[in-house]
Image: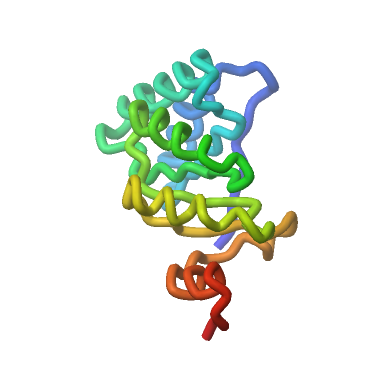
Amino acid sequence: THSKFFGKDIGADAAAVAYEAYEKAKADNTEILMIDTAGRLHNKANLMQELEKMIRVLKKHNAEAPHECLLVLDATTGQNAIAQVETFKEIVNISGLIVTKLDGSARGGIVVSLADKFGLPIYAVGVGEKADDLQAFHAVEFARSLVGLPTE
């Protein structure tokens, strides 16, 4: 497999970029299109409206789009992560989470809180800055390490 990057100049309309990326992916018979909307904060109304617009224009291509919507959360934000998920869920149908910065000892509890409140699957966790530090999430291993038991 190989990947291609589609981007525009800084300041380009994010929804237009998403729309064009979908057109290009479809024309190229691409199986998976990933749209990274990095930098969205739940308390920045203009960025959240832009995200909402992106979803609207993608639905013009395919009424079921986006098929998956993963929210990446920083574990160091603690309980603020709950507010982020709540706000994002009002705009997009979040299908799962990725939780980063779990390499600190006291930050794992937010994963338990998120699972309890939202029941969303956690697909991956970040435990460092390198690409290999993004790892698949294994609930049993995580729970064992959280309470100080050896992982299998």
Residue 78's place in the image compared with 58, above or below, is below
Query: Which residue, as the protein is rendered here, is positioned at the far top?
Result: 46
Residue 84 at x, y percent in the picture: 47, 33
Point out the residue furthest to the right here.
129
Instruction: Give the total of numbered labels.
Output: 0
Horizontal and vertical percent position of residue 150:
57, 83
Tell me where residue 13 sits by quadrant. top right
* Residue nearer the viewer, 91 or 76: 76
The structure residue drawn at horizontal position 31% and vertical position 25%, both measured from the top left corner, is 60
Is residue 143 shown above or below 75? Answer: below
Q: Residue at x 55, y 57 (%)?
A: 108
Q: Residue at x 71, y 58 (%)?
A: 128
Q: 28 left or right of 106?
A: left
Q: How is the image coloured?
A: rainbow
Closer to us: 17 or 119: 119
* The one of 67 and 87 positioned closer to us in this rendering: 87
Q: Position of residue 33 (x, y in %)?
A: 47, 44
Identify the residue shown where x is 38% and y is 23%. Answer: 57
